[in-house]
Image (spheres, rainbow, N blue to C red):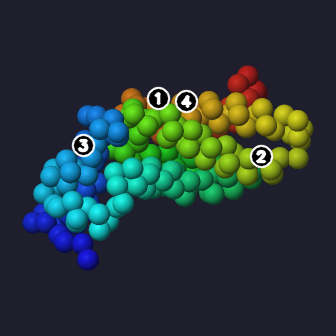
Amino acid sequence: MSRTDPIGQTTVDIIISKFWEMYEKKPLSQINVTDLSKACGISRGTFYQYYENVYALYYELEAEVINTSERGLSDVIMYGAGQNFEKYIEVSSNHLRTHVQTLDKLKPLLNGSESASFRKMWLESIQKNFVKMIEFSDDLPTDDRDNLTLFFSGGLLSVLSNWVLNDCREPAGNIARVATRILSKGILGK
């Protein structure tokens, strides 16, 4: 059972919050259970009730962000496959808004000491879901699918990363419209 502090945070919430604070300031390899527990006001034993070590905590948080990103992709894929351009932009915009809600987690993951690992995991997630979407396309030669998947997924990862690192200042609808236009019509498509 997780204890609750006076402002209603559970022990896990406190651990996660303090972890993010520490991770924004130093690499994962320099965060240890002793310092994190002290920052949380808990014992090391309490930390170990929830996590094996700080790496287990990090990987759980990283997976949570990827899973949040993937949850909305099934709708995006369905509308992408259905070729309903405006509905696809709307669904994509809604999906991008989930990234705004996880901005406090995404920025440290994209900037942190483990950012290459996170970006690789996010790219693989985008590629996997993009492959599902282009399976619906009858007119795309099989030889082009791998290169198109790599090109679009890498480009989308770059656009999303820059968008997040710039505090999502550009409206989600604008980002979705550009990505959708490139996907559906190509860069110079009419």
| Relative image position of residue 167 (x, y in whole percent) | 36, 34
Amino acid type of the residue tagged 2 in the rendering: Ile
Amino acid type of the residue tagged 4 in the rendering: Ser
Residue at image position (17%, 61%) is 43
N-terminal of the two: label 3 or label 1? 3
Q: Which of 19 and 70 lies nearest the eye of the viewer?
A: 19
Q: Residue furthest bottom?
A: 1
Q: Is residue 184 visible?
A: no
Tell me the distance, in whole angstroms, between the alpha carbons under discs 4 and 2.
20 Å
Tell me the distance, in whole angstroms, between the alpha carbons under discs 4 and 1.
6 Å
Tell me the distance, in whole angstroms, between the alpha carbons under discs 3 and 4.
25 Å
Name the secondary structure under disc 4. helix
Q: Is residue 83 left or right of residue 29?
A: right
Q: Are the residues tagged 1 and 2 within 8 Å (C-beta)?
A: no
Residue of label 1: 162
Residue at image position (67%, 49%) is 129
Residue of label 3: 21
Q: Are the residues tagged 4 and 1 within 8 Å (C-beta)?
A: yes
Q: Residues within 10 Å of mark 1 (few under 14, many from 20)?
A: some
From this view, report whether residue 52 is shown above or below residue 149.
below
Q: Residues within 10 Å of mark 4 (few under 14, many from 20)?
A: some
| Relative image position of residue 171 (x, y in whole percent) | 44, 36
Amino acid type of the residue tagged 3 in the rendering: Glu
